[in-house]
Image: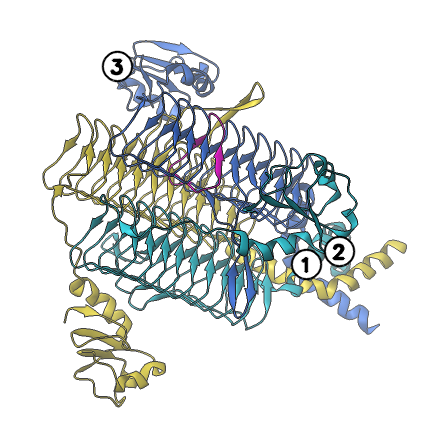
Chain colours: A blue, B yellow, C cyan
Amino acid sequence: MTAIAPIDRASGQDLSFLASPRYAPLFETTEAAVVLVAPDLAETPGKVRARVIVDKPHEALLALLPRLYVPPVRIAGIHPTAKVGRDVRLAEGVTVEAYVVIGDGAVIGEGSWLESHVVVGRDVVIGRDSRLHPGVVLYPGARLGDRVQIHSGARIGSDGFGYVYRNGAHEKIPHVGRCVIENDVEIGANTTIDRGSIDDTVIGAGTKIDNLDMVAHTGRIGRLCLLMAQVGIAGSARVEDGCILAGQVGVSGHITIGRGARLAAQAGVFGSIPAGETWSGYPARPHREALRAQAAMFKLPSLIRALERLVERDDKR
Amino acid sequence: MTAIAPIDRASGQDLSFLASPRYAPLFETTEAAVVLVAPDLAETPGKVRARVIVDKPHEALLALLPRLYVPPVRIAGIHPTAKVGRDVRLAEGVTVEAYVVIGDGAVIGEGSWLESHVVVGRDVVIGRDSRLHPGVVLYPGARLGDRVQIHSGARIGSDGFGYVYRNGAHEKIPHVGRCVIENDVEIGANTTIDRGSIDDTVIGAGTKIDNLDMVAHTGRIGRLCLLMAQVGIAGSARVEDGCILAGQVGVSGHITIGRGARLAAQAGVFGSIPAGETWSGYPARPHREALRAQAAMFKLPSLIRALERLVERDDKR
Amino acid sequence: MTAIAPIDRASGQDLSFLASPRYAPLFETTEAAVVLVAPDLAETPGKVRARVIVDKPHEALLALLPRLYVPPVRIAGIHPTAKVGRDVRLAEGVTVEAYVVIGDGAVIGEGSWLESHVVVGRDVVIGRDSRLHPGVVLYPGARLGDRVQIHSGARIGSDGFGYVYRNGAHEKIPHVGRCVIENDVEIGANTTIDRGSIDDTVIGAGTKIDNLDMVAHTGRIGRLCLLMAQVGIAGSARVEDGCILAGQVGVSGHITIGRGARLAAQAGVFGSIPAGETWSGYPARPHREALRAQAAMFKLPSLIRALERLVERDDKR
């Protein structure tokens, strides 16, 4: 077997799975070599060559994936179209693909992989075995650890959004802090992480960031956090280790999300959150409190007239 | 006439329009060749060479646009700087502009147009007459139909955000599903659509997606949907045919938005929505219910003191 | 002194600062040449070579930054890999870096700087001393003023999201309006600004726009506005001069945000807002009113049972 595929498009070398009766009719026509089948579907008729009965085919598959999945082949070498600046140190075994541009003084560690059109700013440092997908831009001041993976179109170390209003104009504050991405971080497509103003912006080791997220200047994200898509972290906010932020969450500047806290999707967080708690809603509150307030709010319309009458009558007394 | 322009900057070959008395003074100075004029402004003084009285100048203009608008000229051919991998099949009449990179085994259909800096991953399939604007990246596993249009900076088929927490680390789950974009889909600038985990991510035929949207792994968007800007669809969510999602809507994972449903801007959807309904708010509810709850909520502050007193007095009895 | 750095990583040529007792222990080991110290920390022991006592070290630093900060060196010239179309007018002293693509008829003013991989569409006009960071794409129809700065991955002048439903399909409305970016505007990474449908989209002089923002077709943003990250402005909305929109704000189409108004983070704005006011929440209301409604809403759960009983009893009377 060479791959995993859904049952309707599995070929003769593929492993597939049947977990829902909805797809049982496809069992007659699939060409899959082996199919993992849920116990209650074990007797599904079909000409499948081999069926393996497992409790949870989907989970079994996830466990098999890393064994079957062939990671993409990387060939070491510098493509002739790559433009490499002065005093750049490229370690052994790096891959630099077509149309990559590397600024003066950059340092790139062993086994790192810069896919096509990547732009690496002046003096940027990249550790070992890191991978930048096509079109990633690292601004000057970015510093990546080992085994970092950055997806296509992400912008790392862009200028922070800082101005002083003076003489009738928003005057730009130069940003000189770094943007530090520690080991084993993965950053999603088109995400932007600004450099620090004076102190650094830091993404802690092992943290995973989804697509279209924004971490503003001097944000500090701890270790092993998960930030789902379209999350925004304002300037100088601190997210401690092991936090989980669901999609479209917004976190205000200069506050702290305590260790291991969880924020539900679209939560709007305007104050610090204690460690270990789950908050939700706008403005964010402890999840149970938010749910109770929402439930009460949706009961209110049917009561409001009667309540107004009660209050009115009471006032007249 | 060669173009359409607002009345203040129309030149002697342009068609323009006058629909609001606010712009009537410009009628004296405009150089427009022809002006469409609303009936109530028909007598506006001015030296305009030709005026055409129409009920709704703006709508008339929209109808004229496709006739007057000259689509950009495409010249077939492969730019010498394009890097084309092994076993790539380019149909006749394709256009591949400067600095395009096409991975091994890709297939590109007749009349398709890859603008500058586009990156096409290994084994990607693109149908006929599709157009990729500058800097689009198609990851391996992407599969585009005919007449698909993808705007600048969109990332199609990026890895899904899936990890298993094991041995003190978030271990990445390989993503091997495809990212299927059916015929006549248009995708906006900087939007990201992840590939499926095992099953495919699918964007149905004729659906239009705006800028900065996110469709997560194994999302299924039906046919003829409209997704406005900054919408986020979490993993394995299903949006059925003909739905309209307004800006900044968030849809949770593993739920279904029924056929033809509409979601108001910023709606936060945490459960499935029946076909044909309009929902809004956070958490999303049927639109009327949401409006009534909001109205009641904004009446509440003026009542709350009196209500607290009533309840307190009642408790003492 | 050549740079500013946090106290823990300042080298012998750096200026640093000590504003919090938390960092006082680092005073023993820092190599900083000069440290700005808050009055209450003036006596902190340490081998620092020079200490300057100032009231607010952080603010003093911000004031010093523009003097110490060495802007990146720009070398005029056209990189041999740049592809320049026909009838392009490049003023003296422009910088065009590697792999830039400039369409036919474009005009680029004196001292402007196109970093690597920038794509400039046909007939685009760029003023003087503007800077486009790597990978910026200007669609045809874009028109930039002087001293405009656009960050990496921003898409300026992309097609608006406009369709007419006809014959079972969403038919695209051609967009022929321009996308006008006036003088001294700065636009953040991966932000998208669509061109107008017929009239122009305009970003007023001196306005600053953060990362991942979206301004839809024919939006009009006034002068000296600040739009924080992930803000979305729907079609034909008008934001007057001097407005401040915090992160993740959404503004509906065809409404007006009055001069100098402020919108709190995540506000969902469905109607026009008077000049000078501060609004927040969903749906957005004047900030005080929104706060009072939220406070009442969170008091409601503890009252709702008693209120239901009161109303029920009253009904029976």
Amino acid bearing label 1: Leu
Q: Nearer the viewer, residue B195 or A58?
A: B195
Residue sitting at the far left: B92
Q: In this view, does C116 lie to the left or right of A273?
A: left
User: In the rendered image, which residue does mark 1 sit on?
Assistant: A303
Q: Work out whether disc 1 and disc 3 sit on a shared chain.
A: yes
**C-alpha gap between disc 2 and disc 1:** 8 Å
Magenta segment main secondary structure: loop
Task: Please check the rendered image and state whether residue A150 is part of the magenta-colored stretch, yes or no.
Answer: yes
Residue drawn 46% across the image and 63% down it: C207
Which three-letter amino acid code belongs to the residue tagged 3? Gly
Callout 3 environment at 10 Å: few (<14), some (14 to 19), or many (20+)? some
Check contact, mark 3 vs mark 2: CB within 8 A: no
Q: Which chain carries label 1?
A: A
Distance between the Cα atoms at labels 1 and 3? Answer: 64 Å
Start-end of magenta stretch: A136-154
Instruction: Identify which amino acid the numbered label 2 is placed on.
Output: Leu
Residue C236 lies, in percent from the top left, at 39, 66
Nearer to me, C4 or A232: C4
- Name the residue tied to disc 2: C307
Circles 2 and 1, Cβ within 8 Å, touching? The answer is: yes
List x then y, in percent, for residue C148.
Answer: 39, 60
- Mark carried by residue A12: 3
**Residue at x-position 73% and y-position 60%:** C315
Q: Is mark 1 on a helix, strand or loop?
A: helix
